[in-house]
Image (tube, rainbow, N blue to C red):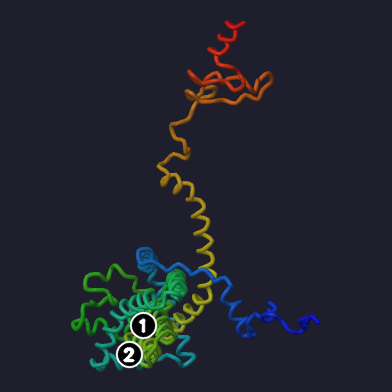
Amino acid sequence: MAQTESPDIEAGPRPVPEREQRPQVRPHQDRDRVRDRAPEKPARTRARWWTELPLIVVVYVAYSAGRLIVRGDVPGAVDHGLAILRVEKTLHINAEHPLNRLFTQHAWAGVPADFWYASLHYIVTPAILVWMFRAHAEQYRRVRTWLMTSTFLGLIGFTLLPTCPPRLLHPAHGFVDTMAQYSSYGWWGGEASAPRGMGGMTNQYAAMPSLHVGWALWCGVMLWRHGRTPVARVAGVAYPLLTTIVVMGTANHYLLDAVAGAVVMGVGLLLAGPVMRLAAVLRTVLAARLAPVVAAVRGGGSPIVSGGCQTSAGERIPRQRETRHGPGAEPSAAPADAGDGAAGRGLPRSSAAESLGNAG
């Protein structure tokens, strides 16, 4: 009897279904794959120093020029200063008097305070700005916009509310100008913190708000948020506080000037986002307007690709074949400009026609 194979016995290994061959993937692995396949957000263009430096110079020039606009309104500035002093006395917050007496009676406190007031305002702020540019590029544009927006708000305050600082009030009000008292210790003269002989180039009545305090507050926030050491955070708290004490002790600002400087920085922080969006819109519009000009310059000034290779109407390039599709056109006709030796399709050559005629 012939033996037959059992249907349960297979000659080779049983093929594994495709669904069983697929490796088991855990849910969290699926999420990782989806996240890896998700399109990444385009990286923001890093600010360039050759565009940032002119911008900062323009802002500083505007800051210096804005301080000079209202320097001639001395009576109004004095009235504003006296009004601020009366408000502080009413609220019992006139801390300028005890601090000013401390700095004028003790040179060990007054001289360093004058150096602080005359120097750090123009050293620490640019240094923090450069540090943010180099070490925290992703945050630089926003914090730079915050600083510049607040500065422009301060210029508006200088223009609308010129204020006489305590040191320029009548001596009967009890203030002493420490910058003038200790002028022999530094480079400044008796006119604010300007170098000797350059006092006429400054506006001594730009006291409200105090951008010394405002900029110091900005520096403190940068050190606190982005500093990686405890020393940086301590400096972030100490620098604005000491600057506030210095500007009042040297009789350059009232306490309310310092408060106004902090308020200006707060408003500038709120406006930084809208200002950046507006700047982005303006850049887009400007780029669209300049695109044709840039394209023309890069293309050599001629928007026509063919340049001088154009032909007039009806003119044909020599030995150029032309296709005739009009009525009466014969597909087998030889082109008129085919040149010598070119034979039309479907027609015998002239020599072959003569041979046929002779044969007939």
Q: Amino acid at mark 1?
A: Pro
- Residue 126 visible in this rendered orientation of the protein: yes
Residue in front for this viewpoint, 75 or 291: 291
Q: Amino acid at mark 2?
A: Asn
Query: Do the residues under discs 2 and 1 have CB atoms within 8 angstroms?
Result: yes
Tell me what residue is drawn at x 23 percent, y 84 percent. 181
Dot 1, crowdedness within 10 Å: few (<14), some or many (≥20)?
many
Tell me what residue is drawn at x 19 percent, y 84 percent. 185
Q: Earlier in the sequence, mark 2 or mark 1?
A: 2
Q: Quadrant of residue 15?
A: bottom right
Residue in front for this viewpoint, 260 or 10: 10
Q: Secondary structure at mark 2?
A: helix
Dot 2, crowdedness within 10 Å: few (<14), some or many (≥20)?
many
Residue in front for this viewpoint, 295 or 223: 295
- Quarter holding the C terminus is top right
Image disc number at residue 100 = 2
- Residue 275 as seen in the image, left or right of residue 206: right
- Residue 12 as seen in the image, left or right of residue 206: right
Q: Position of residue 244 (x, y in %)?
A: 38, 87
Q: Position of residue 245 (x, y in %)?
A: 36, 89
Q: CA distance from mark 2 to mark 1?
A: 10 Å
Q: Position of residue 14 (x, y in %)?
A: 69, 81
Q: Which residue is mark 1?
A: 166
Q: Quadrant of residue 322?
A: top right
The relative height of residue 250 versus residue 137 in the rendered view (above or below) is: below
Residue in front for this viewpoint, 231 or 176: 231
The residue most toward the front is 1
Q: Quadrant of residue 127?
A: bottom left
